Image: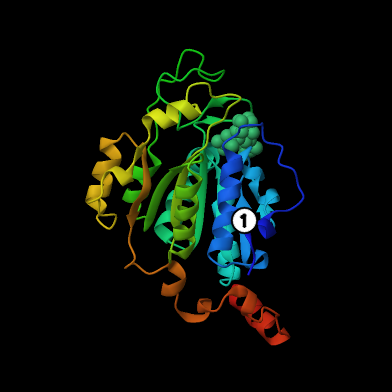
């Protein structure tokens, strides 16, 4: 069985020293080993951003896609090869700005994919612009007088979109984060794990200390029931979206793959996609 070290490769991350993304990389590697995966059974698909580099830093199949498109690619990979465990990953800009349309539809589609968002509440790669996750009043080069837009709440959106697994964590809490990624991988459906991941270079507001002061860990509420969607929504709102832990899980709804009927039941990689002359002629006749 592979250990977490076997999910390491020899590529040195070029993240800034202290970037929260390092711990997320470590948590993915540990979770993959803990659930008993081998590197060739895992695919990590990422978008563009500092966070998007993660697919190059894990010893597994990987694809560093285009900005905001990690999820369409990840869904294609999963549909083509159901035996792969598929993790999609990227920044809050990638998933909640340019890619938000895909995020919502991937959530409601409910393919068996784990989506880990590295939420630093800013655009890191492009040197510090305001993101939909930035707070109102947030000052950057793109909002020099402070953002006048309201902050997007991905957890509330996920619940409204019919999510079957919603969790949130903090990159410094490696134990909680690893356990949540393990649970997300085991979940039969789409799992959203939003991870607070400080950008030490450009975000001087949402720092490690700021997160430590503001996070509300669900462990404080021993009676909390993560299967109740209404209480999940209330708790997210009560804590202003700063809740960490497993917030909601629906184990009753089947995954997309489990509901597919007809010829699509078989993964594309297992189907004979060669085209006979007879089949080709039939297709041409159909579209004449
Ligand atoms: C279609 C397109 N639009 C814009 C960009 C420029 N761009 C690259 S990364 C990025 C945002 C990065 O922020 P985020 O996704 O939060 O990731 P981070 O770098 O903070 O990890 C933008 C706007 C791009 N590469 N492609
Ligand atoms: S710019 Fe920010 S998000 Fe990008 S590597 Fe540096 S600390 Fe991390």
Write the residue at 27% across / 38% down. 237
> What's the colour scheme?
rainbow
Is the residue 272 above or below the residue 245 in the image? Answer: below
Q: Quadrant of the N terminus?
A: bottom right
Q: Is residue 229 above or below residue 12?
A: below
The answer to whether any part of residue 72 appears in the image is no
Question: Hey, which residue is sitting farthest right in the picture?
Answer: 10
Kindly give the residue lying farthest to the top in the view shown: 145
Residue 118 horizontal side relative to residue 176, left or right: right
Q: Name the residue at 71% across, 41% down.
A: 13
Please say whether residue 12 is visible from this viewpoint. Answer: yes
Q: Along the line of sight, which residue is nearer the eye, 243 or 33?
A: 33
Q: Determine whether 73 is above or below 243 in the image.
A: below
Which quadrant holds the C terminus? bottom right
Return the x and y of residue 135 as percentages of the image width and height: 41, 25
Question: Which picture quadrant has residue 156?
Answer: top left
Q: Circle 1 is placed at which residue position? A: 44
Residue 149 versus residue 175: which sits nearer the camera?
A: 175
């Amino acid at each position: 069985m592979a250990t977490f070290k076997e999910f390491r490769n020899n590529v040195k991350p070029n993240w800034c020293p202290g970037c929260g993304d390092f711990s997320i990389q470590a948590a993915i590697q540990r979770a993959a080993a803990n659930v008993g995966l081998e590197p060739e059974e895992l695919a990590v698909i990422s978008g563009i951003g500092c966070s998007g580099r993660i697919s190059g830093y894990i010893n597994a199949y990987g694809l560093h896609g285009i900005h905001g498109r990690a999820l369409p690619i990840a869904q294609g990979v999963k549909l083509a090869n159901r035996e792969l465990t598929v993790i999609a990953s990227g920044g809050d800009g990638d998933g909640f700005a340019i890619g938000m349309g895909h995020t919502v539809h991937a959530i409601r589609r409910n393919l068996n994919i784990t989506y880990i968002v590295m939420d630093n509440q800013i655009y890191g790669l492009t040197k510090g612009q305001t993101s939909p996750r930035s707070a109102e009043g947030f000052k950057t080069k793109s909002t020099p007088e402070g953002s006048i837009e309201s902050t997007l709440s991905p957890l509330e959106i996920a619940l409204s979109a019919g999510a079957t697994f919603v969790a949130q964590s903090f990159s410094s809490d490696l134990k909680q984060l690893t356990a949540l990624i393990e649970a997300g991988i085991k979940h039969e459906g789409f799992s959203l794990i939003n991870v607070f991941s400080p950008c030490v270079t450009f975000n001087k507001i949402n720092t490690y200390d700021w997160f430590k002061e503001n996070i509300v860990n669900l462990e404080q509420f021993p009676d909390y029931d993560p299967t109740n969607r209404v209480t999940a929504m209330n708790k997210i709102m009560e804590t202003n979206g700063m809740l960490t832990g497993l917030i909601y899980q629906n184990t009753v709804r089947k995954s997309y793959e489990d509901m597919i009927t007809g010829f699509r039941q078989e993964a594309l990689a297992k189907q004979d996609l060669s085209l006979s002359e007879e089949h080709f002629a039939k297709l041409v006749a159909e579209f004449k």
